[in-house]
Image (cartoon, grey):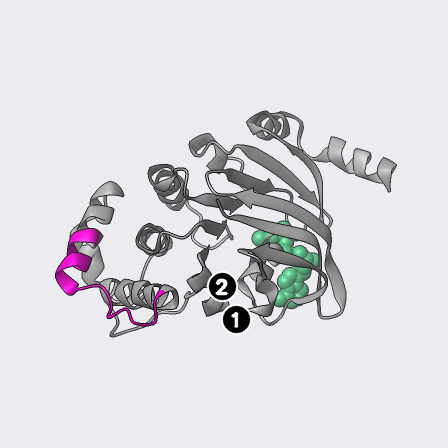
Amino acid sequence: MSQLEIRNLHVSVEDKEILKGVTLTVKQGEIHAIMGPNGTGKSTLAYTLMGHPAYTVTEGEVIFKGQNILELEPDERARLGIFLAFQYPVAIPGVTVANFLRSAMNARRRAENPEDKGIPIPEFRKMLKEKMDLLKMDHSFAGRYLNDGFSGGEKKRAEILQLATLQPEIAILDETDSGLDIDALRIVAEGVNALMGPHLGVLLITHYQRLLNYVKPDFVHVMLDGRIVESGGPDLALHLEEHGYHWLREKAEENA
Ligand code: ADP
Ligand code: MG
């Protein structure tokens, strides 16, 4: 059983400290939601885990399969079994969703076995169709050029299909503001629900409580000012819906 262990992570952007010591472990089979008001560092955490160069780690480590992944390139992290949403946010005209997914899959297979010749095309097509059926996607989607003119919802679909085909151990999904209509939310939620099982661990970052109406997290964490100030079960999300974040700010100030 693999787990992603974030240990005392401090991150700065342009010399300003944004994350001030985040500690969190996500195991396969668990869904962890991170919630919190805007500007508290949620996306900073996601970008740091992805290896975005604008985010400087000043302290702490992130351990996965015995390695500090902060020392690895983003593609090495992916090959190790960590799925990072928005890894390929750019449009790639001329590359279809199917071609892209097959290359990504083959890269992962080759990381496990350098002799691997890649997945045979008929086998890949069969697998892709099964995944698209599981996610209730139209098969024509696989023939579209990746992210070329995709709506917010279609980008999410591509992302979830990528998640389904790559079968990572840990997936980190950040619900950034882009394309966040209710459809996009539902696509992510239904995708996560369809793919969830003992082999997948999910770190779901969201400021939209609504998402948690569709996905049931095992753990809910609240981030305020670069720290996780409260953790609990699904009840915590309901409590936040009713009472907001104010009580947590007061509590955090008392502890400061
Ligand atoms: P959240 O996702 O919780 O809304 P962010 O992680 O996006 O919060 O932002 C946390 C803080 O870090 C904000 O004050 C934001 O302005 C700052 N920040 C994040 N990314 C950048 C960046 N690339 N350049 C400058 N400031 C940034
Ligand atoms: Mg954000």
Residue drawn at point x = 61 percent, y = 50 percent: 5
Q: Is residue 54 above or below residue 6?
A: below
Residue drawn at point x = 86 percent, y = 42 percent: 256
Q: Residues within 10 Å of mark 1 (few under 14, many from 20)?
A: few
Q: Is residue 86 above or below residue 25?
A: below
Q: Is residue 126 magenta?
A: yes
Q: Is residue 246 above or below residue 24?
A: above
Q: Residues within 10 Å of mark 2 (few under 14, many from 20)?
A: many
Residue 207 seen in render: no
Extreme-bottom residue of the structure? 94
Query: Which residue is identified by label 1?
Result: 73
- Give the left or right position of residue 193, taking residue 134 as reference: right
Extreme-left residue of the structure? 122
75 or 20: nearer the eye?
75
Q: Is mark 2 within 8 Å of ligand 1?
A: no
Q: Position of residue 2 (x, y in %)?
A: 50, 48
Q: Are marks 1 and 2 in contact (CB under 8 Å)?
A: yes
The quarter of the picture where residue 88 lies is bottom left
Q: Position of residue 217 (x, y in %)?
A: 51, 34
Residue drawn at point x = 23 percent, y = 62 percent: 98
> Which quadrant of the frame does ligand 1 lie within?
bottom right
48 or 198: nearer the eye?
198
Query: Which residue is identified by label 2?
Result: 77
The amino acid type of the residue labelled 2 equals: Arg
Q: Secondary structure at mark 2?
A: helix
Q: Position of residue 111 (x, y in %)?
A: 39, 67
What segment carries the magenta color?
A: 113-127
Q: Position of residue 245 (x, y in %)?
A: 69, 35
The amino acid type of the residue labelled 1 equals: Glu
